[in-house]
Image (cartoon, rainbow, N blue to C red):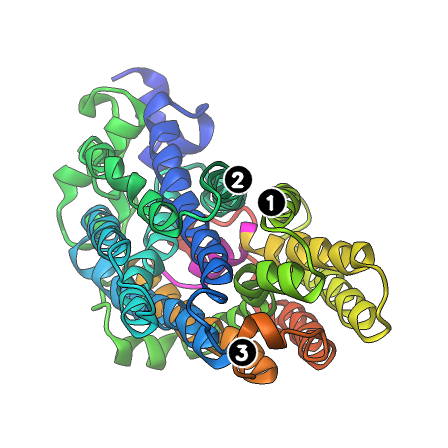
Amino acid sequence: MSAENAEQSALQQIDSRPLTGHQKSLIGLAIVGNISEFFDMFLIGFVVSLLTKPWKLTGTETGVILACSGLGTVVGAIMWGRLADKIGRRRTFFRCVLLFVVFTIVSAFTPDRGWIMLAVLRVGVGIGVGGLNITSIPYVQEFVPARQRGLLSGLASVFIPFGLFLGSLAQKAFHENWRLLIALGALPVFLLIWIRAVPESPRFLQTKGRTEEARASLAWALEIPVEQLGSLPELAERTSASYPTLFRKHLKALVIVTLGSFCFILGSFTVQSWGQTLLQTGYAKSASTVGTLFMFVSLVDLLGRLGSAWLADLIGRRRTMFLYGLLGAAGSLVVAFSAHLQASWVIFFIGILMTMGFGDGAFGILNAFGGEQFPNDVRSTGLGLGYGIGSSAKIFGPALMGAMIGGDAVQQNVTLDAVFPAFVLFAVLLLLGGIIYLFAKETKGVALEEI
């Protein structure tokens, strides 16, 4: 062991060295896995807009299909978060991918007018998708330098909107072939091979008393022999990743993550799932035009997420979340008043861009910050439960819009009357979400072992 290595602990070695190819591979895995979530969510939103006329879907039926995706993600986030602290981040991530790929393939064979079957299958897809972000963020956080942890772990969420861009390209390429569009959601099956090439999280292994495996994992990340790895940090007394422990020791953090997630999710998820239908039918835009417009939405959202992940390491997590909540709320008000005053669709679309760029752009750091509110042994459990309950907004948002629109068939009854009250509510929630995160523990530059 060199003199330099002898003086440094394993974590100091990680903090003092540039990223290795192995660390970049792990970050890449998380990025691609999470892109799959938005790719899937955009495709189902567009598929539903294609099916409203031939299937004669009512607003309520459309809302149920979209809300079932949200229901699945709630169950998935809670379930996978707990499992990630019990069986490991790597094994859990593998199972998430496997589950959503299987249910996606089956969804492509839904019979015509089989909206109930499609809704049920969307629950299964949502359960798989719901664990991707929850497991991948702690996974990345536990391999990267503390000084860059906000940006590097946030990258798992930053590039999610690229899935929206890919979905837009798929829509333009395959037009109204909805079965093929759904089937494309199974492409991430190749991730199952990639996952096999990376080790388990060293922090998870150490909390389970598997010290030698933890050392091997860190040595893999640094691309050095195990003998050259410094000492591992001393762990505090290990506790079980149980819900009683979570409620007893980390209730404040859990409440902040739950309420903050709910506020930010409600508006942005509703735009993702209903935006295409509102533009296509409320403003009489063609399917091709909507696909093109949402390519711009994906770009703005990606830049917004990259900005929040970068700012979090510069000005702190709390200030970043408040700023993005405030600007996202402003965007929602632009949407609301443009619809209420019957302004040009251009003004409406600018509001959509602002809402997604900031309201959804906050997700570049939101889950990374949420995970940092909990110590190593309950990180995924706490993030999964808090974000999972908060994700109930993915049910309420689409269902709320569907109930407001109502009618006998979406194609015949979509108007912009429901937009004003809904997006005023979203504005209030985004601002409230930004305020809630001001009460969180600031973790900029803090080592995970000190949390």
Q: Earlier in the sequence, mark 3 or mark 1?
A: 1
Disc 2 secondary structure class: helix
Q: Amino acid at mark 1?
A: Ser
Is residue 22 something that shows in the picture? yes
Q: Amino acid at mark 3?
A: Gly
Residue range highlighted in magenta: 364-375
Residue 288's label in the rendered image is: 1
Residue 172's label in the rendered image is: 2
| Foreground of the two, 310 or 266 | 266
Residue 398's label in the rendered image is: none
Mark 3: give few (<14), some (14-19) or many (20+) Cα within 10 Å: many
Question: What x and y, as percent, mark residue 80?
Answer: 26, 62
Can you tell which quarter of the image residue 246 is in?
bottom left
Is residue 304 something that shows in the picture? no
Residue on which the image places disc 3:
402
Distance from the alpha carbon under mark 2 to that under mark 3: 26 Å
